Amino acid sequence: MEINLLVLNVGNSRLAVATFIAGELQNVVRVPHAQRADWPGIITEAWRKIADTETPAVVGATVNPPLTESLEHIVQQATGEAIQWIGTDIDLPIKVKTDEPAQTGVDRVLSVAAAYEQLGKACVVVDAGTAITVNFCNDAGEFLGGAIAPGAVLQIESLHEKTAKLPQVQLVPPVGFFGTNTPAAIQHGVFHGIRGMVKELVENYATTLGVWPELIATGGDAQMLFGDWELVHAISPDLTLYGIALALVRIAGPLTNAFLAANFSRPALLHRCVHGQLRDGETTIDDPVIVLGEGWADISLHGGQWVVQRTLELAMRFGFQLDKATATVDSEDAIERDVLNAISSARTELALRVLLSQHNAWATVRETLDVHRLRTALEDRALENLLRLPRVAIVGAPNVGKSTLANALFGSARSITADMPGTTRDWVGEIADINGLAVMLLDTPGVRETSDTIEHRAIELAATESRTADLVVVVLDASQPLAGQRTLFVQYPHAILVLNKSDLPCEWESEVMVTVRTIAHAGDGVPELRQHVAHYFDCDEIDFSQARCWTARQRSIVTAAVSSPPTLHQLWQRSENANS
């Protein structure tokens, strides 16, 4: 068995680059994000080490979405390959039992998966980096959840930046039982505070589990924080990289179809994702997703030492060579290929469901050549919006509740809120799931006249972002005079108008055509606002049988087919510009 991978792990503070050559982790390099200019050279050098091996591939994991696009471009230029992202293109290697699996950090899951693959039993993984995460796995190899806290460096920097006199200190193990000066006291507080938190969490889990679980430490600060601690079973700085390499197994050879027919519960379809059960006789090994290619199949397992080993043994009994690589998108059916190429852009379950419905939806249109359905396909922008990440800007005067409303839409606190005008000093952009529609939600500084140079510049930059947004949400404050807020909804005539603090008396409400009323801090009206945003982008009422266009190639062909329906057959034919 040979495993030849270029592995990328995008953390909060740095990028880890490594190679798996013949299944062995080698050449690990960690680069701070401040040194992004070094990424192309490091990635090119890493790829050179595996480029001539059999079916090399690039696999990555990220907890830092803003860096994804630039990294994908660098990798494409350096290797000619696309990054296959864990959790998006490739299933996570273990089952995630949290309340919202899609919102659980992929790095946390991968570290636990790698630890369980080695131990084969319940364990705890503490990852010490920008954040400290403590994550729990049961005996079945399922990720249960954990705790997240500021990392050691973040704690030290916050004490220095948020206080008047506390100094910046180095992150080193403290000496003695307590600090006899201020720097030493900070070191003791951070060091023992982290250890105390970890110990308390592990003890709580041990009580639930009935046995003391083994504790594995990983991350850049693991050695310094836990190197001499008897509570830690082992320190593995590259645990997440191992977890990335666990996620996919490829079988390749002339007996691929026979193997799947004998051991997979459903018929495998060429270049399509099929979910089913992988069986060895009467024993169910796992419920993977399988993509079948020409002479190969990618099996996306849910991991665990037993699952991986049984899969390898089963495949090797058929005489296959196994390779942890990724499927190449290639199909004679251009619609099918368009679907496969777009899967990585489907950030939500709704987007994926609509995308996967298109093969059958267009097959129906092909049979009927119904011109009305062709026109509807051109007019409908739902799938295009589900895939392209529209930009939605929230604007308003200071203290109207923009950031509170943004946090409600995000589903958690991303923007700082306070009663002081000017708290938001720069626009905050992050992906939010609006009823299944992924949008880049921009929370902007409060618009006001100010003598503060930094705040004034931030307001100018935010105005530029708002002008280029696909949709603007103007937040009005029922308790403030209308005069200071009127210019905003005049400036953005097509905006959604939100009357926040609607539980307070408002003397001018009848003068404005308000779209929705909210009490942001209580969550009142937020579901209605989500509905209005989804409706704006045609994503509020989805008909999965509706054929839709999501590429320029498709629109060009369908536009011509409205006048000449027989030309629609070109939609399924390959062409040189099929990826347009």
Image (cartoon, helix red, strand yellow):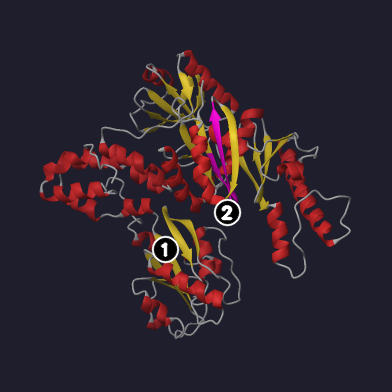
Q: Do residues under tags 1 and 2 come within 8 Å of each other at their CB atoms?
A: no
Who is closer to the viewer here, 16 or 243? 16
Majority secondary structure of the magenta segment? Answer: strand
Q: What's the residue at 57%, 61% (across, down)?
A: 413
Q: Is residue 299 above or below residue 157?
A: above
Q: Total of numbered circles in the picture?
A: 2
Callout in the foreground (1, 2): 2
In this rendering, does residue 120 appear at all? Answer: no
Q: Which mark is residue 509?
A: none
Comparing 482 with 426, the one in front is 426
Q: Is residue 11 magenta?
A: yes
x 67%, y 52%: residue: 149
**Amino acid type assigned to the residue bearing label 2 in the image:** Ala
Task: State the mark number for residue 34.
Answer: 2
Marks 1 and 2 sit apart, C-alpha to C-alpha, by: 28 Å
First in residue order: circle 1 vs circle 2: 2
In the picture provided, is 138 more to the left or to the right than 482? right
In the depicted structure, whether residue 251 falls above or below residue 424: above
Name the amino acid, label 1. Answer: Val
Residue 427, percent from left and from top: 50, 66
Q: Secondary structure at mark 2?
A: helix
Foreground pick, 30 / 244:
30
Can you see residue 198? Answer: yes
Magenta region: 8-21
Question: Along the horizontal axis of the image, is 412 left or right of 229?
Answer: left
Counting from the top left corner in percent of width and height, residue 180 is at: 89, 58
Q: How far across and how far down the image is residue 52, in percent?
A: 45, 27
Q: Secondary structure at mark 1?
A: strand
Q: In this orientation, which residue lies closer to the viewer: 346 or 507?
A: 346
- Density class for disc 1 (Cα within 10 Å; few <14, some 14-19, many ≥20) is many
Residue at the image point whose x is 59% and y is 66% from the top:
416
Q: Which residue does the numbered mark 1 point to in the structure image?
A: 392
